[in-house]
């Protein structure tokens, strides 16, 4: 029993766990930062003011995780974020193919608690900062009402991933809030006062059909008249959760301090719309629906943005600025919303895409005036316009991994975040991120420790792509379709297609490529030809006279011709894809992006694949066959298709293919990293949307690693990830390393990279 008499005052219980890095904010950026730092050996305290991790991705808000892939609605092929966020999304698809929000909560918690170097403090809010000098944070003070405990968290390094930037704000870091003028950075897309300078918050809801009529009585504070919400007419009974992203409000208010006011207004809107749906008589199909869930906290889009040594701007996104200090990538559209939200007569958002992905420099991930403070998440150093793209969660997660990895370097080198921008430290940061699966556009990080480039790579077989055999399905050319193919320099192959036509005529076939290598926007016409065809089923050939002058991806385009059907194929191959000049209604309004000229944004066509299982290749022949899938590809990066396929792919007829690295002299191997084809084109949205498989079909499933004596030194069964990382506690000495593939998850065996480290 505890019995205390009266006293003048009492103090809260106080704890001060020791750490090398304090991460404040447990959204995806903070979670990935904490995991990355912990895996690099740092002691990390992760402070989250909510009961679960994930921020806007959690079950409390239920926004799907997206980034550069943009629902496969832009021209960013094979662009999904890698590293830790990919690891999380792969696990979520495997366990949670139907997209249930509570399962993602458990996966995020599992990833964190499995790291012995992380101390996780949930329901704990930072409210005070201590400083040792004007430029240095020495501690943050937080309180957890669940256990009535005060925490004083001291560390040499801090990361603010809190969304509103509580640590950076209290510490006095320079910040911005609202939109810059068009003149300040020459941004043609900068909004005017009529559009508004801040993005608002959103609140989602879920419904359920219970099979019997259900009535609804609205609370007294619900919105009585929804006629002022023009977009309420978009509702249909199939919409759930973040389909209602446009239930937005607050862009005219202080999106930090007025959050509770904004939440109440969104509650009024949600319950008012539901009252209209249930009781207006306009939606009889909703008779059996109940309101199953309504969010209790809004999902925030924008508040403070803190200044680093560089501010990302519109031109960096649209022009894909090649930064030497790139540590993460993005690719979401420049996506701004009218400040009046649901009460605006304007479209719910204005989105303009770049022609490809862009890099984000290290200089955006730390405060320019608080020397030991990293920035992660939506608060990084960017203008309002650039923030419209960098703010999305998968992009934030990739930046979080960069921050966590950099924190380890700072600790090892006894340096501060700004000093990582130096050549030697920067190269090491990029090398570590590359090893961990992070995609760094525009650079190929040097890895001097990698032994693979010194080996001769051979294989029992390799794909020479001469045919994608047809199935029984036909596709009408209601829009243009193209095969995206990695071609070698030299004479252009002859391409054959099976077509069926209701009449004779001629089909325009074009050979296109992107002006900028590694982009997938076919904005350069190489040659166009007219191919005659008879009525009925026939085979046509496209013979281009212009040679291929630049190795890499080209589009073999069949122009729109509604009288023609083209045969489809069920065969899927790594780095080969059919795309259509259609558009994704979730992120565009036309198959052609045509922004106003004064915005400084490019006009171009969208060329998009369809999702599996609907997405199929066009049946075709290629003569001579494409011979770009050789084993030497695995000894260098990047580990995804970029300028070309970058992968070894086995011949489909090879039942147990082998890939062999041979050195002239014995080498000592301490670690092997294998990187497989995780279908980087698939967005893997975390909630609401379903996925065609639990594991993508391009991944290798069962395999062995063997030394030169034929002994198995490592093995995996039921493998289902982009990466396999095998350390050897006792270095392995061998002249040969063999990867023997026993089974895949469907497609022929494919490997992007083998990294062999001493």
Image (cartoon, rainbow, N blue to C red):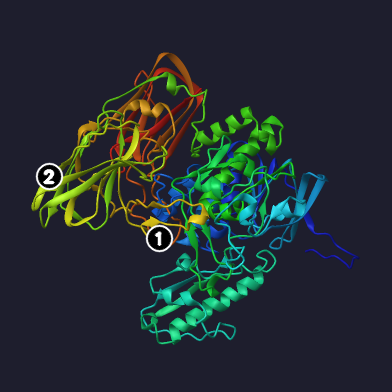
In the depicted view, which residue is nearer to us: 83 or 430? 430
Mark 1 surroundings: few (<14), some (14-19) or many (≥20) residues within 10 A? few
Q: Quadrant of residue 643?
A: top left
Give x and y (percent) for residue 647: 36, 33
* Secondary element type, mark 2: strand
Q: Quadrant of residue 191?
A: bottom right
Give x and y (percent) for residue 18: 73, 43
206 w.r.t. 77: above or below: below
501 w.r.t. 430: above or below: below
**Tag in front: 1 or 2:** 2
Q: Which residue is mark 2?
A: 539
In the picture, measured across the screen, residue 134 lies left or right of residue 657, that is: right
In the picture, measured across the screen, residue 158 lies left or right of residue 570, that is: right
Give x and y (percent) for residue 374: 67, 44
For the residues bearing labels 1 and 2, Cβ distance under 8 angstroms: no
Residue at the outermost top position: 665
252 w.r.t. 676: above or below: below
Badge number at residue 144 = none
Residue at the outermost front position: 597
In the depicted view, which residue is nearer to us: 620 or 471? 620
How far apart in space, not on screen, are marks 1 and 2 (Cα)? 38 Å
In the depicted view, which residue is nearer to us: 734 or 200? 200
* Secondary element type, mark 1: loop
Which mark is first along the chain, 2 or 1? Answer: 2
Residue at the outermost right position: 8
Residue under the image location 40 percent in, 60 percent down:
689
Q: Which residue is mark 1?
A: 689
Residue under the image location 36 percent in, 48 percent down:
695
């Amino acid at each position: 029993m505890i019995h205390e008499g009266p006293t003048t005052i009492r103090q809260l219980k106080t704890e001060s766990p020791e750490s090398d890095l304090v991460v404040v904010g447990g959204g995806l950026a903070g979670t990935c930062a904490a995991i990355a730092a912990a895996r690099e050996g740092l002691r990390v305290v992760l402070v989250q003011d909510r009961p679960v991790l994930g921020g806007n991705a959690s079950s409390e808000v239920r926004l799907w995780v997206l980034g550069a892939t943009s629902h496969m609605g832009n021209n960013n092929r094979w662009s999904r974020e890698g590293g830790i966020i990919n690891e999380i999304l792969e696990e979520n698809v495997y366990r949670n193919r139907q997209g249930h929000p509570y399962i993602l909560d458990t996966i995020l918690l599992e990833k964190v608690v499995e790291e012995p170097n992380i101390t996780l403090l949930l329901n704990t809010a930072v409210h005070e900062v201590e400083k040792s000098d004007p430029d240095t944070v020495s501690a943050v003070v937080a309180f957890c009402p669940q256990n009535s405990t005060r925490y004083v968290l001291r560390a040499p390094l801090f990361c603010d991933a809190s969304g509103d930037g509580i640590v950076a704000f209290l510490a006095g870091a320079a910040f911005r809030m609202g939109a810059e003028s068009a003149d300040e950075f020459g941004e043609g897309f900068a909004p005017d006062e009529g559009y508004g300078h801040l993005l608002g918050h959103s609140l989602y809801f879920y419904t359920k059909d219970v099979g019997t009529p259900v009535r609804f009585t609205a609370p007294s504070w619900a919105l009585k008249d929804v006629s002022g919400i023009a977009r309420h007419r978009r509702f249909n009974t199939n919409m759930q959760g973040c389909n209602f992203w446009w239930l937005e409000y607050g862009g005219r208010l202080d999106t930090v301090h007025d959050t509770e006011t904004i939440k109440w207004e969104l509650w009024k809107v949600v319950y008012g719309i539901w009252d209209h749906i249930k009781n207006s008589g306009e939606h009889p199909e909703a008779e059996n629906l109940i309101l199953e869930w309504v969010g209790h906290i809004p999902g925030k889009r924008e508040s403070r943005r803190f200044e680093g040594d560089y501010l990302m701007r519109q031109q960096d996104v649209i022009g894909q600025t090649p930064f030497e200090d790139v540590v993460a990538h993005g690719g979401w559209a420049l996506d701004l919303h009218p400040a009046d939200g649901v009460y605006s007569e304007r479209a719910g958002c204005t989105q303009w895409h770049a022609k490809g992905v862009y890099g984000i420099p290290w200089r955006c991930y730390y405060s320019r005036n608080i020397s030991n403070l990293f920035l992660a998440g939506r608060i990084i150093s960017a203008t309002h316009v650039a923030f419209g793209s960098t703010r999305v969660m998968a992009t934030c997660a990739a930046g979080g991994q960069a921050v966590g990895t950099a924190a380890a370097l700072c600790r090892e080198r006894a340096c501060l975040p700004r000093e990582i921008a130096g050549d030697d430290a920067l190269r090491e940061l990029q090398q570590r991120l590359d090893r961990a699966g992070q995609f760094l556009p525009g650079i190929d990080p040097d890895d001097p420790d990698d032994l693979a480039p010194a080996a001769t790579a051979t294989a029992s077989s390799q794909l020479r792509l001469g045919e994608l055999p047809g199935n029984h399905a036909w596709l009408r050319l209601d829009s243009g379709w193209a095969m995206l193919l990695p071609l070698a320099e030299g004479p252009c192959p002859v391409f054959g297609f099976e077509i069926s036509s209701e009449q004779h005529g001629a089909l325009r076939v074009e050979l296109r490529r992107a002006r900028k290598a590694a982009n997938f926007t076919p904005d350069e016409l190489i040659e166009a030809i007219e191919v005659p065809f008879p009525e009925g089923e026939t085979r046509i050939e496209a013979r281009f006279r212009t040679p291929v002058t630049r190795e890499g991806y080209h589009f073999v385009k069949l122009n729109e011709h509604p009288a023609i059907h083209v045969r489809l194929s069920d065969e899927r191959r790594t780095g080969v894809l059919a795309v259509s000049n259609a558009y994704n209604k979730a992120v565009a309004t036309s198959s052609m992006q045509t922004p106003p000229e004064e915005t400084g944004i490019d006009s171009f066509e969208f060329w998009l694949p369809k999702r599996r299982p609907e997405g199929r290749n066009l049946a075709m022949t290629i003569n001579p066959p494409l011979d770009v899938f050789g084993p030497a590809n695995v000894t260098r990066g990047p580990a995804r298709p970029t300028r070309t396929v970058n992968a070894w792919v086995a011949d489909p007829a090879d039942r147990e293919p082998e890939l062999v690295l041979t050195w002239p002299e014995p080498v000592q191997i301490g670690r092997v990293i294998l990187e497989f084809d995780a279908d980087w084109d698939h967005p893997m949205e975390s909630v609401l949307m379903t996925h065609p498989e639990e594991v993508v079909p391009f991944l290798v499933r069962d395999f062995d690693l063997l030394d030169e004596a034929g002994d198995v030194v490592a093995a995996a069964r039921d493998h289902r990830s982009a990466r396999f990382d095998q350390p050897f506690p006792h270095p392995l000495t061998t002249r040969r390393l063999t990867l023997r593939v026993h089974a895949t998850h469907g497609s022929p065996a494919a490997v992007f990279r083998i990294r062999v480290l001493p």
